[in-house]
Amino acid sequence: GGCWHQCCPGRNNACWASGAYRARCYCDSYCERTGDCCEDYHAVCRRAAVGCLVGPWGPWSGCSSPCGVGSKARSRQVTVPPRHGGEPCPDLKQRRGCLGEHPTCGTAK
């Protein structure tokens, strides 16, 4: 089977070629997980793959609640998007709990 000129990112059941014994082999990046890639997939398709790269985490935001339980968030940006079936991007946002402790909290009723 040959993937020449038909490499597909992600899972694409229409991205296949005739393999040995008339069986289908696939040229999509998902074939690595399922083990049904065409024989030339790595030589033809993976060479052009570019995995996602992300920048550093930004600072945590302030607590969403000035008094009591709230949450903080932070994010990061994609610097190089994935191409040609490369590794997908990791999480770009994180959230965690916090406890607001504004000076006026103790005096509020």
Image: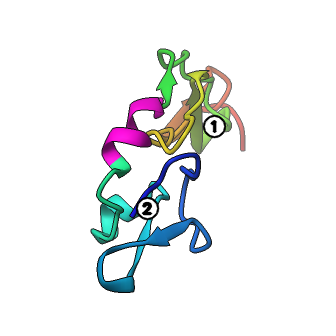
Residue 79, x across and y down, in percent:
58, 17
- Give the magenta range: 42-50
Kind of residue at badge 1? Cys
Residue at the far right in the pictured view: 109
In terms of secondary structure, where does tag 2 sit? loop
Residue at the image position 49 percent from the left and 30 percent from the top:
52
The quadrant of the rendering that contains the C terminus is top right
- Front residue of 16/102: it is 16
Task: State the CA–CA distance, disc 2 to disc 1.
Answer: 48 Å
- Front residue of 59/91: it is 91
Asked if one can make out residue 60 in the rendered structure from this viewpoint, the answer is yes
Q: Is residue 55 magenta?
A: no
Residue 100, x across and y down, in percent:
57, 33
Crowd rating for badge 2 (residues with CA inside 10 Å; few <14, some 14–19, many 20+) = some
Which numbered disc, 2 or 1, marks the residue that appears first in the sequence? Answer: 2
Place residue 63 in its image quadrant.
top right
Kind of residue at badge 2? Tyr
Residue at the image position 54 percent from the left and 64 percent from the top:
11
Mark number displayed over residue 21 = none
Residue at the image position 33 percent from the left and 51 percent from the top:
40
Residue that badge 2 annotates: 30
Place residue 18 in its image quadrant.
bottom left
Answer above or below: position of 51 versus 15.
above
Mark number displayed over residue 67 = 1
The quadrant of the rendering that contains the N terminus is bottom left
Crowd rating for badge 1 (residues with CA inside 10 Å; few <14, some 14–19, many 20+) = some
Task: Characterize the magenta stretch by its predominant secondary structure.
Answer: helix
